[in-house]
Amino acid sequence: MIEPDNDSTLTSPLLNLANRGGYLFGVTVLWHPDSAMVGAQWVAPADMGQITLNRFSPLFLPPDQLTPLPIGHQAVSRVPIMLLLNISGGLQIVPPESRMLVELNGVAMSGPMELTADQLGRGVVLGLGGLVLLCLHRVATLPRRGLASELIGVGSAMTRVRELVAQAASTDLPVLLLGETGSGKEVAARAIHRLSKRRDKPLVSVNMATLGESLAAADLFGVTKGAYTGAQSQRPGFFAEAGEGTLFLDEIGDTPSTVQPMLLRVLETNEYRPLGATRNEISQARLIAATDRRLGPDSFNQPLLRRLEALVVHIPPLRARREDIGVLIGHLQQQWLAKTGVSAQLPFSFITELCCYDWPGNVRQLAHVLQNAVLTCQRGEWPTLANLVGEADRWYPAHLALTATATPAPPHQPSPVAMAVPKVRQAPSALTEQQVVAALEQAGWRIRAAASLLGISRPSLYALIEINTLIRQPDALSIDELQAALLASDGDIDQCAACLKTPREALRRHLKAQGLL
């Protein structure tokens, strides 16, 4: 059975447990004083019922090892935490009667907590003794390593991606990589090339968003001398440069419309004609394309899309594979150390924040935040995620709605404000004042997050804010009004910005300039 696809493309059959209607329950070590334990996993049937979790049980299988090991660290109590799986796919966590600190998504537990199946699907972070972090999550495939070792991850999502990448590498079919920005599409493309029979041939990467409308055809297919004004010599294009290797077309959704039929012809016939030439050339390159956009009929040649999607690989966002964050942190730290020689021991509270955060910028953003955190530690300062992501994103300190009772949390219903925010890219001029305000409210009055929700650039959003009669500018507010809002919000800038209906970062700067912070 073929899985329906939200990006208007075809997909491969799902070869996992979910395709047969079932899931396993998994516990992955996100963080541990012994780095060799990070990424270790324990998997059980979802109908197991009662699970005891303590210093000695269960036994976790570390990555690339054959001997299972317990958590083992003395910070973890011998008195067990009880995990009670229910028939609805949820889980009750009963903390132990001990002095050990137990945290759920960074918040200390004071009694039993109930998690829904949806919360487990997103991954829940369990902190033990202030030194160990575990991820409780659903498992769709049994843990196993794949050939594409550069695609880091121990969970089901990356297991499937590695297998699809290996399958794609064994063919010469075009491949379409779908995934959000920063999720690792170029890493997947390089893995396909490395594993293919073309590994000793060139890999040419092209960002289609950088090709100008007028010269895109010349850049891709080449140009002969005198083909147009300024063409003073013959120049080969990217197809000729790739030769018998791989041509990776990133941001394929930004391909100029005039070039899309030309790409379709290359895929159909392997032939193309350089600008000004009198005969066709034969392309022997293997084509891989990638996009973070929906390739709809209004903006993209659909016959070309059908050719590109001979093989489709979805790269999951980081928030959909929370169990991988620990091994990614370790990998990225090693990369940064090898590159700069700079390292630092990050505080456990900061690691907890990293693991609980829903990363809108995915692995790329995680890498940047880690680099800044290391440099912050080098300066003798204490890193916090809120300071390092700044205005870029909205911080959810407890993003999973947890309940303190054994009653499952009610299903989330989108608010009218959230539903008013557009879900696709559109011209800024098409947005209403109410839609702009709704996006800012949903994004906690943070500019970049709101711009992302609206599908526009930050400069465009700043321009809309300037003319929006429903939004107030901080410098237009009186000192008395600012002081009253600060008092009403107990000094919380987020609440203050929401109360005053003004952008959060601009308000913070204004309050600081006025000496009110």
Image (cartoon, rainbow, N blue to C red):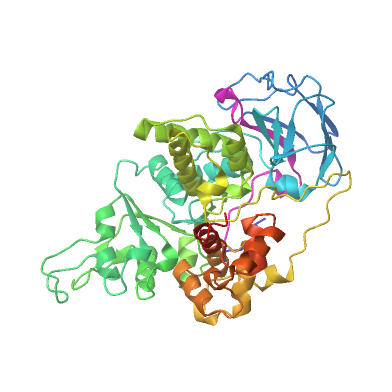
Where does the image place residue 156, in percent across and percent down from the top left?
63, 41
Relative to 239, is 183 on the left or the right?
right
Classify residue 102 as left or right of residue 218. Answer: right
Q: Which residues are magenta?
A: 10-39
Residue at screen point 78% across, 19% down:
78
Q: What residue is shown at x 65% (from left), y 54% (from top)?
A: 491
Q: Residue at x 67, y 25 (%)?
A: 60
Query: For this rendering, which residue is in front, 354 or 53?
Result: 354
Q: Position of residue 278 (x, y in %)?
A: 18, 73
Judge left or right: residue 261 versus residue 18. Answer: left
| Residue 402 in view, yes or no | yes
Q: Is residue 302 visible?
A: no
Q: Is residue 485 left or right of residue 44?
A: left
The one nearer the camera, 22 or 315, is: 315
Q: Position of residue 241 (x, y in %)?
A: 25, 55
Quadrant position of the N terminus in the picture: bottom right
Residue at the image position 63 percent from the left and 69 percent from the top? 501
